Image (cartoon, helix red, strand yellow):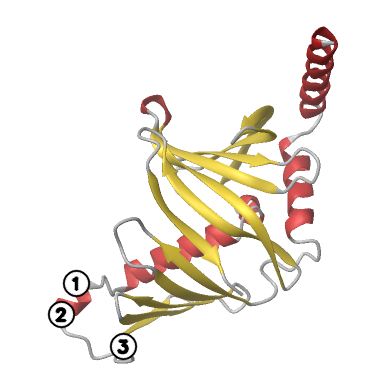
Amino acid sequence: MKMYIQLFLLLLVTATGLRAQTVSAETLLERSIKYHDPKGQWGKTPMTLNLKETRPGGSDRTTTIGIDLKKQTFRLDQMREGNQLVYNIAMDDCTYELNGNSDISPEDLEKYRLNCDRAKTMRNYYTYLWGLPMKLTDPGTILHEVKMDEFMGKAAYRLKVTYSPEVGSDIWYFYFDPSSYALTGYRFYHDEATNDGEYITLKGEEKIKNFRLPKERKWYTHKEDKYLGADILQQ
């Protein structure tokens, strides 16, 4: 009986591997986008997300982000250690507030990192993460080969992604469920040779305006396998 089970598993892995070879990066991404954004609304409809962000050794944050790619606006409203930080971006113009006040001392500007560069970094960060996998169609994204792999103990398609120099230098690996094509997690490396980077697990799902978004995202380092925190979607 044990021999038959081993043979069955071998055939299953072989068949799945052959199937992976027939899926191109473009087809895999198209199918995943169809799963997460079945109505093709990304970039066309505004989105508001309420998040609980936890960090080991630090206080929890509650964050509300508003993304409207069509109007090119972004808003972040975050409660952190009893203080309210707000960033607003419209086109390339930005404003920021601390506890409802835009007249902020130089000391608090530095302490809370309230500046336009930081505002745009936050916009890019949240828009990228919550726009996956749709953001993988952006200009400058380079799709590489699809391979059959495993992520967190489960079989998964693995798609390697790099970026043109003007966009970014990190190497990314995205993992997709072989049946539904749902995004199940990802890794990025600043330097893959030294294992310098992080991996991110996804758990659960929320439906928001026809989007299927991860309920919980957890971050870990590659080198130390150190837990860095969680982003929890609360709608």
In the displayed orientation, state which residue is furthest to the left.
107
In this rendering, position of residue 49 left or right of residue 166: right
In this rendering, position of residue 189 left or right of residue 138: left
Residue 36 image offset from top left, x and y in percent? 73, 58
Q: Nearer the viewer, mark 2 or mark 3?
A: 3
Give the amino acid at mark 2: Pro
Which of disc 3 and disc 2 is earlier in sequence?
Answer: 3
Which of disc 3 and disc 1 is earlier in sequence?
Answer: 3
Crowdedness of circle 1 by 10 Å Cα count: few (<14), some, many (20+)?
A: few
Residue that numbered label 3 is attached to: 99
Crowdedness of circle 2 by 10 Å Cα count: few (<14), some, many (20+)?
A: few
| Badge 1 element | helix
Q: Residue at x 36, y 83 (%)?
A: 95
Q: Quadrant of residue 43?
A: bottom right
Residue 148 image offset from top left, x and y in percent? 70, 27
| Badge 2 element | helix
The numbered mark at residue 106 is 2
Residue that numbered label 1 is attached to: 110
Q: CA distance from mark 2 to mark 3?
A: 15 Å
**Looking at the image, residue 11 lies above or below residue 177:** above
- Which quadrant does the C terminus fall into? bottom right
**Looking at the image, residue 144 lies above or below residue 99:** above
- In the image, 77 versus 30, the foreground residue is 77
Q: CA distance from mark 1 to mark 3?
A: 15 Å
Give the amino acid at mark 3: Asn
The answer to whether any part of residue 210 appears in the image is yes
Q: Nearer the viewer, mark 1 or mark 3?
A: 3
